[in-house]
Amino acid sequence: MDRTAGKEAMEGLRQRYPEKFADLKTAFGRIHRGQTIFISTACGEPQFLVRSLIDFVESDPKAFSDAEVLHVWTLGVAPYADAKFEYNFRHNSFFVSDSTRDAVNQGIADYTPVFLSQVPALFRKRRVPVDVALIQTSLPDEHGFMSLGVSVDITTAATEMSTTVIAQANAYMPRIHGDAFVHIDDVDFIVPHDEPLLTYEATVPGEIAERIGKYVSRIVQNGDTIQVGYGSLPDAILSNLFEKKHLGVHTELISDGIVALMKAGVIDNTRKSIDRGKTVATFCMGQQETYDFLHDNPAVAFREIDYTNNPLTIAQIENMTAINSALQIDLTGQATAVSLGQTFYSGIGGQADFMRGAVLAPGGSTILALPSTARDDEISRIVPVLDEAAGVTLIRGDIHYVITEYGIAYLHGKNIRERAMELSSIAHPKFRSWLISEAKKRSMVYKDQAFIAGKKGEYPEELEVYRTTRSGLDILIRPVKISDEPILKDFFYALSDESVRRRFMSSRTDMPHERLQDFVIIDFTKEMVILAVKQVEEGVEEIVGVGQYGIHEPTHTAEVALVVRDDHQDQGVGTELLNYLTSLARSQGLLGFTAEVLYENAPMLHMFSRMGYDVHRTAEAGVVELRIGFRGRDDARSA
């Protein structure tokens, strides 16, 4: 950044407003007992002012007492939360961070649970009065304006309502557009002090985070406007979006990952329904390179948090996709990101506002992404019920998608039984049988719900393939999931009586839970059930065909069967299913298929005859028994 002009403006202001450049002892002398002291957020924290305030108190312990320190998030040290300063300070945070968590849980600091979007109103209505604001700004411009830089959030309102404003003017603070500006007339004391801003560097995403990121990328569509939180998991999510186009951003936090997507042209904000052309946020936590990018960049606007996080604002954004994480989610779909039992871990923050706003937005969706376990796989984050005293951050209606490293569960519009099965299916395999057992005890699922534990019951995601049939129909062919029972039921009841009779060779047309379990509870080492599905709308799949085989171990062959929904017959769905079943069977080393087909079912017989393998037929009582050897003519030549 070019800081020369700022230095020159500073000198001019010093000549014009000498009283605003008083020494720190004079500035801190404005603080009286029982007052509230506000400190800017996270990377915007005025480190020099905080250190100097502590030095001031240590040199004169009785200078003031019982001052309340207000903060959203402290990224650096928080000496005012130390027990040795309890005479002078009582910390009150709107969000619990690493450096204040112990103090809050030990009762020597306070936590105020509140939607961050509502904090500016608390200040302006004096429900939470601010007496002294310690802020950090950029160097002033020639008009006397200084930018709040990387911490606009609640800082603008605190500055506006504070009786005394002490600003650390720092050449390292970027000048950011939006609601970020404060004029020298509105500042009581200016303390010029240059020092690098606090930076935030997420831990390098691991394999689990990368897998979750890839799943999230399936949900995010070109042209969506996104909101993403902070940490290694959000960074992994953002790193998987480089193939997307025309993304927009309306978020609380700008991170290094968002800036990387802006530089790559993935985020251009051209499709946003409000604030088009602007990446909108309220604060930033990142590296110096990110701060340099934000400096005087008209493509970025930092707005007050009561705008960015307001659900009514978010609800105006078409195709808004809110992506957040949690500590724990229960089988009914309520989640906590705030506490582990009665132990406070973070805060309400903006998560609930963004998720609620995205639910209300036209075409909006919400994604809760979290690793399936904690503490090196010792604890499941998907639980039957939330821990006692846990704070519910997201209620059951706030979440559309839940994503772990084991897949995607879609909850929107699902009943409790369906939710329990969906979430159990993406839990860590070692906890799935436990979750099903607990769900049975709580009458969340069928009392006779079957489950295959261990590797043989795991969903083989690697077998998912996309195909286009000869009629041009795009389908996903995938193995059946334990949570597919509801859509399988819809599929079977959509079949005509004739299709049911041909498939099952029976006049029975009902398909109760007991029969459906035979299709969804699969030991993939002994049998295979695959579905041909199409997506009819976001998160909603429709089955158009089902194929299956069961291995006959003595002959190392398998009995195969398939059925296609009546309105999708003669479109190539059955051929794609049979071809894929054949490919899977051959990859297992099976020698062939057997099948029983009604003599009248000419289309099915014709499909088998086109396979190109040795087909032997015998007929009895109107049923054709087929024996299909995988060694065809091409194989015979090469043998």
Image (tube, grey):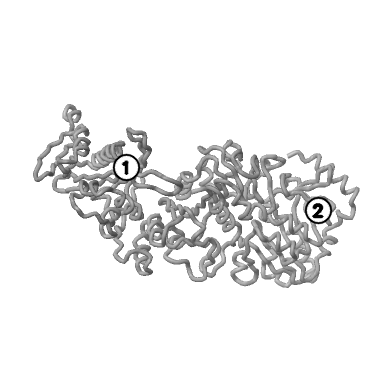
Looking at the picture, how far across and down is residue 257, in whole percent? 57, 44
475 sits left or right of 88 in the view = left
| Residue 191: assigned label | 2
User: Within 10 angstroms of label 2, few (less than 14), some, or many (20 or more) residues?
Assistant: many
Q: Earlier in the sequence, mark 2 or mark 1?
A: 2
Dot 2 and dot 1 residues touching (CB under 8 Å): no
- In the rendered image, the vertical position of residue 286 relative to residue 435, given as above or below: above
Q: Secondary structure at mark 2?
A: strand
Please provide percent x and percent y for residue 447. 31, 66
- Residue 519 lies, in percent from the top left, at 27, 53
Q: CA distance from mark 2 to mark 1?
A: 75 Å
Identify the residue at the far front of this view.
Answer: 497
Specify the label residue 201 is tagged with: none
Q: Nearer the viewer, residue 289 or 460?
A: 460
Whether residue 66 sits left or right of residue 419 in the image: it is right
Q: Nearer the viewer, residue 378 or 560?
A: 560
Whether residue 542 appears in this view of the structure is yes
Q: Position of residue 154 (x, y in %)?
A: 70, 57
Horizontal arrangement in the rendering, residue 254 relative to residue 185 (left or right): left
* Image quadrant occupied by the C terminus: top left
Type of the residue with mark 2 = Val
Rendered-image quadrant of the N terminus: top right
Residue found at x 79% / y 66%: 59
The residue depicted at 50 percent of the width and 54 percent of the height is: 368
Hey, what amino acid is under mark 1? Asp
Front disc: 2 or 1: 1
All told, the count of numbered labels is 2
Residue bearing mark 1: 567
SS of the residue under disc 1? helix
